[in-house]
Amino acid sequence: YDYYQPEAYVPSTDTYIEKDSSINDRIDRLRLKCTSSLLARRDVVVVASVSAIYNIGSPEVYAKRTVPLEVGWKVTREELLARLVSIHYERNETQFTRGKFRVKGGVVDIFPAYMETALRATLEDGEVAALSEFDPLTGHKAKDLKSAWVYPAKHFVTDGPERKRAIAEISAELARRLESFRSRGKLLEAQRLEQRTRYDLEMLREIGFCRGIENYSRHLSGRPQGARPNCLIDFFPKDHLLVVDESHAAIPQIGGMYEGDRARKQTLVDFGWRLPSALDNRPLKFSEFEALAGQTVFVSATPGPYELKRTKGSVVEMVVRPTGLVDPETIIRPSEGQLDDLIVRVKERVARRARALVTTLTKRTAEDLASYLTAHGLKARYLHSDIDSLERIQILQDLRAGVFDVLVGVNLLREGLDLPEVSLVAILGADHEGFLRSETTLIQISGRAARNVGGQVILYADAVTGSMKRALGEMDRRRAKQIAYNAERGIRPRTIIKAVSELEEFQTTAKREGLMLLRETERPLRAKDLPSIIQEVEGRMRAAADALDFEAAAFLRDQLFELKGMSASRPAGKKW
């Protein structure tokens, strides 16, 4: 998704927020390509987020519904078209895009939902006479094929008998739930649930799909109540290898997914928006994830207690880097006069065309420090959780590109940031024992300077805490080992050279600050202003959804619909 707002209900204000999303076409294609590849071959590497533990549908049903195209296959045109429709491909003679097919005489063109090229099947005398792959834009044939598999266009697919069984089970559950609501005098909840569910059942009968079909996945897949859902890991063979990157952060995140999802869905069930079976459309519990994981490699510069317990202390250290880079030099400076000292050191780095990161303890301090550095002739920006994720990406790109030289942040300058241009990391308040200055955090923040041959870390502190002592000891140990390895083999460290990539489909304008929600000025609203206003409201809506502020997101969504309606109904230049 480019944008995803989950279904939610806020009882205190009687506010229902419908599921809303903007699907990223490229990522959706790769997602379907992932599952189809896993079923077709064994040499597959999949890079996934925590979404890998969410419900995705049954791999057995997905594989069974595949259409096997092969030269010589006995099939009529009508039978082939019916098979394609049953796996959620749509017939469209004018707009030939992913998940669509078109027909001209005995030629059937199919654009698989997971491919960038299309397939052409030529039918003669009740069989496939020819099969080829072609460019859907130019129509040029790429190659002739003897066979090809067409996998479903969606992950949730059912055939006729399974669908009938599922509809019967959903109807029975609905009857029980309605009786329960009515016996307790909850007539509004009963009416709400009946109306929504019967509409979904009608859609399932007619087209085999409905909006929010994943909420009925327990019935569609025939799972018993409480059984774990199918997820991406189920598509892998039993002997797969799982690599958990940045495991010290990923493992707690995986462990917390179930409870957060359950709390949101339980409210929907209690107030008649969903059947109780919707609770089984969920991420894996941590114990279920462990049972599926199999062979696992935990990767982290600062492994947590779970990883160390699972491996029983059998840790393989990967201290030496291919580039010969060593952990940055670390020094401690007093807090008194720290800003003057910081400015001098940052200017030294800027003179060498390098960048600097500064981490503080609060958002307000980060903003104030960025302003202070700017006032003293440095190009500085701040970064913290109040800035939406797309704008954070742009800020980091600008830092690498040299648009500014110093980035001040709180706790976002940790794992996962690859910034080779940064040669200085300054940590203010390093002696404030706590989460933001724990041993793990100090090592992770310091690691941001490890991509540059001139990397240095400065800890501003008046005392050496236990966390500082342990972090410094570990970094010094690694640094000594790296230096000795390089000396023995005559390796000369070199800074990583990495292109500053564009944001592609995630690119956004980061100039939203200071804009008012509806441009509430005394000037009349003009149609020519609407595109920028719509962009602003949509940005705020996404930010609210990211922050789980569903009420605000719903309000902004309604406002967005109103603005788009105004845009469609008025010519440019007209006033309201």
Image (cartoon, helix red, strand yellow):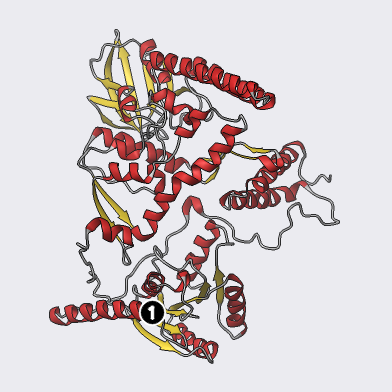
The quarter holding residue 303 reads bottom left
Q: Is residue 561 above or below residue 89?
A: below
Front residue of 345 and 402:
345
How many other residues sit within 10 Å of disc 1, few (<14), some (14-19) or many (≥20)?
Answer: few
Q: Is residue 273 above or below residue 461?
A: above
Front residue of 108 and 69:
69
The quarter holding residue 474 reads bottom left
Residue 286 left/right relative to 237:
right
Residue 297 left/right relative to 487:
right
For the point 79% across and 48% down, which residue is it?
Answer: 526
- Where residue 15 appears, as percent x and y from the top left, is 68, 39
Mark 1, secondary structure of its residue: helix
The quarter holding residue 465 reads bottom left
Q: Residue furthest top?
A: 125
User: In which quadrant is the C terminus drawn?
Assistant: top right
Residue 19 can be seen in this image: no
